[in-house]
Image: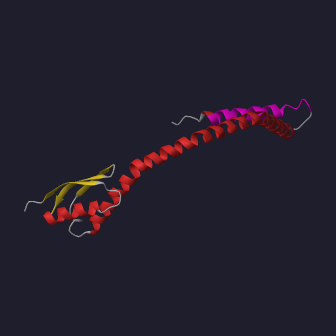
Amino acid sequence: MTHPNPLRVAIAVAFASTLLAACDRTDGRTAGQKVDSAVERTKTELARAGEQVKPTLERAGDSIERAAQDVKPTLEKAGAKIKEATGSDAAITTSIKADYLKDPDLSVFKIDVDTKDGVVTLNGVTENVAAKSRAEKLAGAIKGVKEVRNHLTVKAG
């Protein structure tokens, strides 16, 4: 068994109360006229409340805008530092991995590439010493690489 939605129940009760009040003919108006009158009063009260709240909302909006302008330079500096610290390292790693995928002798092996502050560390296995050397050379040729630490091992075979 489902329970009735409390909001729907409240709306139904309010609507029923309005209709019952509208049915009271003590002032000579029809139920429809009473409902129309109640709707108009509600619109008027809502408009008045909106006008009272408007200046407060405008002041709050101005305060938020000033705060955003105050914080903007700090956020821009932080973003630049994050990009400087991680963006170039990520770009280096991505470029090296892309070069390895293009190389038929390196693409078949799992080579882990980690970059920190421009220092690239290679881990994994290669087919032979020439492939190990080529992996190091490709990594060292990428812009921004300061050093390559080649921890690759040659596949036993």
Residue farthest right in this picture: 28
Q: Residue at x 32, y 64 (%)?
A: 98
Badge count: 0
Which residue is pictured at 35% across the width and 60% down the height?
Answer: 143
Residue 120 lies left or right of residue 19; in this view the side is: left
The x and y percentages for residue 5 are: 59, 36
Q: Residue at x 65, y 41 (%)?
A: 65
Who is closer to the viewer here, 107 or 88?
88
Vertical placement of 46 versus 132: above or below?
above
Q: Main secondary structure of the magenta part?
A: helix
Q: In this rendered view, identify the residue nearer to me: 138 or 8.
A: 138
* Position of the C terminus by quadrant: bottom left
Residue 121 versus residue 3: which sits nearer the camera?
121
Q: Is residue 68 left or right of residue 13?
A: left
Image: 35 above or below 119 = above
Residue found at the very far front of the displayed protein: 146
Does the image show residue 128? Answer: no
- The residue range painted magenta reads 7-27
Q: How is the image coloured?
A: secondary structure
Residue 27 can be seen in this image? yes
Image location of residue 77, percent across then percent down: 50, 44
Which residue lies most toward the top here?
A: 26
In this rendering, position of residue 96 left or right of residue 86: left
Percent from the top left, x then y, of residue 110? Answer: 22, 59
